[in-house]
Amino acid sequence: MKFKRKKVFVCGGVSYNAVITLPDFFEPKPQTIHSCVYNETIGNTGAGKALALSNLGFDTTLFSVLGVDEYGAKVKLYLNKPNLNFTYGIDPKGTERHVNILNSKGERISIFTNPNSENLFIDYNKYMGNIESSDFVVINISNYCRNFISICKDLNKEVWTDLHDYDGKNPYHQDFIDASDYIFFSSENINDYRIFMQQMIEVGKKLVVCTHGGNGATAYTDKKEWIYEPAILDFELINSNGAGDCFFSGFLYAYSLIRSIQECMKFGAIAGALCINTKELVSDQLNINVLDALYLKHYNV
């Protein structure tokens, strides 16, 4: 499949994380755990999407914030990749950091050990050119990304967003919901994800996609079509961090080629499956050739 290079602007979500993997979550009582799988790596949704999209041939610009510290230096090394232009503001609190605790089912407890500052001085207008020249704009739900919303509106740019584990009522997400044309989210914390998806299409969204981890993903289109795609389960689960961002990126890759939504869901499923088979945020096997080959293998087309 021939891929014409597209430009994408991704805003928000870079951290340096400690990742602890256990067979099961521990009981909430004082105890000593003598054994786990442990690693430290880059994390967060902006980094995950930007790394995956750049691997898939997009000309990718990622904007985020970092501290002037050792963790920020490590993040910059991770993001020094072909097709990826990483630009950032400075957070005086330091680089965002998390401790992620995973179990053998791929479930996660995420503890923000150093969240971003609430108010940051950022020259948002500096990035108007990047946004205007991009084919796709992805605004993640980091608080400092809100100020990009008005720029996207002024430039008449469609917005893609990922609400993650939105519960259907948290007011924090409302600005991002209102601004978006394409919404991705997880069914993890929402009682009836289908009702929310229908509401979003009714208010004018073009597409809503809900991921269900190992249970696949569901799309609802502006033609009021429901499309379900099972997860690919023949990849060993090593680490689920970044799987949703890789699903998003595989979907967007196919979407940029004007494939059907059903086909986009399949490409997303493949990219997500590759992700769970690595300790890193994005599999180093994720590229156009591998994605296309696995599509042929799994779907016989």
Image: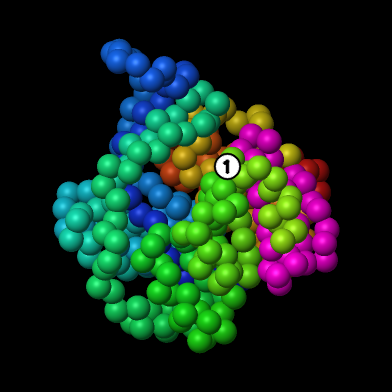
Q: Amino acid at mark 1?
A: Asn
Q: Based on the displayed image, in which of its 4 quarters is residue 253 positioned?
A: bottom right
Side (left or right) of 262 relative to 175? right
Viewer-closest of 262 and 300: 262
- Whether 176 is among the magenta residues is no
Q: Residue at x 50, y 59 (%)?
A: 171
Write the start and end of the magenta stretch as one range.
Answer: 200-229
- Whether 207 is among the magenta residues is yes
Q: Residue at x 62, y 45 (%)?
A: 190
Q: Position of residue 86 (x, y in %)?
A: 34, 65
Q: Residue at x 77, y 46 (%)?
A: 228
Viewer-closest of 134 and 189: 189
- The correct choice, above or below, for 74 with respect to 5 in the image is above
Q: Which residue is mark 1?
A: 189
The answer to whether one can see residue 103 in this image is yes
Q: Position of residue 88 (x, y in %)?
A: 30, 67
- The correct choice, above or below, for 26 with respect to 70 in the image is above
- The correct choice, above or below, for 39 with respect to 92 in the image is above
Quarter of the N terminus within the rendering: bottom right
Q: Position of residue 109 (x, y in %)?
A: 43, 34
